[in-house]
Image: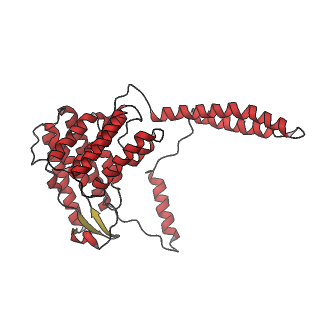
């Protein structure tokens, strides 16, 4: 469904991926406050819920009670040494809701595959939250405590838990040699006793072919990096793994139930699936809504409609603003214009 977008937009912060710090006034004071030990117990219970749902989904006997989104419980506040942090479970409710609806999907196998992937991501996130909650807080640097800081840095370097430096590849070495040759050529072409016009002519003869070669080389690297292969099938977790018409059909079903927020949510991903299926960008589950807009910089008409749809989606989904039938109809109109191009 939208696993990676939810996992990417909801920040994975300390502790236990608890989200951003929140003020102590306003709506947050109405949430239940729990200790780190209570937080760990809650996370253990939520992992059991996810595992039970995944087991029944694998057996294709999923019942509403097994994957009920309400099993995630309400949002809470955990009291840590660095202050108050808010536990938000919208991403978990979406994974459970997708699993509960998998049996009734039009293409059952694709829906079950997507739901299983979402539950796997949810389980991994709960485990990461538990590990971060159990990890000791990072010590604060105190002036004069240089020896302690040095010991900590030495321990980090010896552990090897960081990306190791890699030698330059063959193409990178060729590129570096070419740049050095180009710089030497430009220095040697600088005028000594010749006229400025002759110097500019010589420089243009060298710079224009080299500029075209550089442009071609960069484009080749970009194509290789993006992996734009026409015959490559998208991952089951990417938006285009589900046809945009099916996203829209699910959104219309939610609208008939009066769940306008979720309905707009599905309409947005129908638009992304539609554009992604046209190979406008390589399928990637990690991309955020604003990154999708950046990929349409060369298509201003489509970008304008997607911008309006993204704004409506963000206001109702992430901003938790109320949505209604009018918002859903407007979102469907934007989708129709995007699909018609």
- Residue positioned 84% across, 40% down in the render: 196
Q: Quadrant of the C terminus?
A: top left
- Residue positioned 45% across, 38% down in the render: 299
Residue furthest right as drawn: 193
In the rendered image, the vertical position of residue 27 relative to residue 124, given as above or below: below
Q: Quadrant of residue 139?
A: bottom left
In the rendered image, the vertical position of residue 75 relative to residue 295, given as above or below: below
Out of 65 and 312, give the one closest to the viewer.
Answer: 312
In the rendered image, the vertical position of residue 317 relative to residue 201, given as above or below: below
Residue 85 pos. (x, y %): 30, 66
Out of 165 and 129, give the one closest to the viewer.
Answer: 129
- Residue positioned 30% across, 58% down in the render: 319
Q: Is residue 193 left or right of residue 200?
A: right
Q: Quadrant of the N terminus?
A: top left
Out of 274 and 303, give the one closest to the viewer.
Answer: 303
Residue 325 pos. (x, y %): 21, 50
Examine the rendering and report whether any part of residue 280 can be seen: yes
Residue 231 pos. (x, y %): 38, 25
- Scheme by which the image is coloured: secondary structure
Total numbered labels placed on residues in the image:
0
Q: Is residue 155 left or right of residue 248?
A: right
Residue 98 pos. (x, y %): 20, 44
Q: Quadrant of residue 273?
A: top left
Examine the rendering and report whether any part of residue 287 can be seen: no
Q: Is residue 320 left or right of residue 164?
A: left
């Amino acid at each position: 469904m939208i696993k990676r977008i939810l996992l990417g937009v909801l920040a994975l912060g300390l502790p236990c991926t608890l989200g951003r710090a929140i003020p102590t006034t306003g709506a947050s004071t109405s949430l239940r406050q729990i200790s780190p030990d209570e937080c760990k117990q809650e996370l253990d219970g939520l992992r059991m819920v996810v595992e039970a749902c995944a087991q029944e989904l694998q057996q294709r006997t999923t019942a509403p009670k097994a994957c009920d989104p309400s099993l995630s419980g309400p949002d809470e506040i955990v009291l840590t040494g660095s202050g108050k942090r808010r536990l938000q479970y919208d991403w978990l409710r979406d994974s459970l809701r997708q699993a509960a609806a998998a049996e009734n999907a039009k293409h059952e196998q694709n829906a079950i595959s997507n739901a299983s992937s979402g539950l796997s991501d949810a389980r991994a996130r709960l485990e990461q939250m538990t590990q971060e909650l159990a990890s000791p807080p990072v010590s604060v640097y105190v002036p004069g405590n240089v020896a302690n800081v040095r010991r900590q840095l030495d321990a980090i370097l010896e552990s090897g838990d960081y990306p190791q430096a890699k030698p330059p590849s063959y193409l990178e070495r060729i590129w570096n040699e070419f740049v050095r040759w180009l710089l030497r050529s430009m220095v040697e072409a600088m005028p000594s006793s010749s006229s400025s016009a002759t110097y500019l002519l010589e420089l243009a003869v060298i710079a224009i072919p080299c500029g075209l070669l550089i442009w071609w080389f960069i484009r080749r690297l970009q194509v290789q990096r993006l992996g734009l292969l026409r015959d490559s099938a998208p991952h089951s977790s990417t938006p285009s793994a589900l046809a945009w018409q099916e996203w829209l059909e699910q959104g219309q079903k939610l609208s008939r139930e009066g769940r306008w927020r979720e309905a707009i949510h599905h309409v947005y991903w129908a638009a992304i699936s539609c554009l992604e299926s046209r190979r406008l960008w390589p399928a990637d589950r990690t991309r955020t809504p604003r990154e999708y807009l950046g990929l349409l910089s060369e298509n201003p008409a489509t970008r304008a409609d997607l911008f309006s749809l993204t704004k409506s989606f963000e206001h109702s989904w992430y901003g938790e603003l109320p949505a209604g039938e009018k918002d859903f109809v407007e979102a469907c109109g934007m989708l129709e214009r995007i699909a018609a191009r």
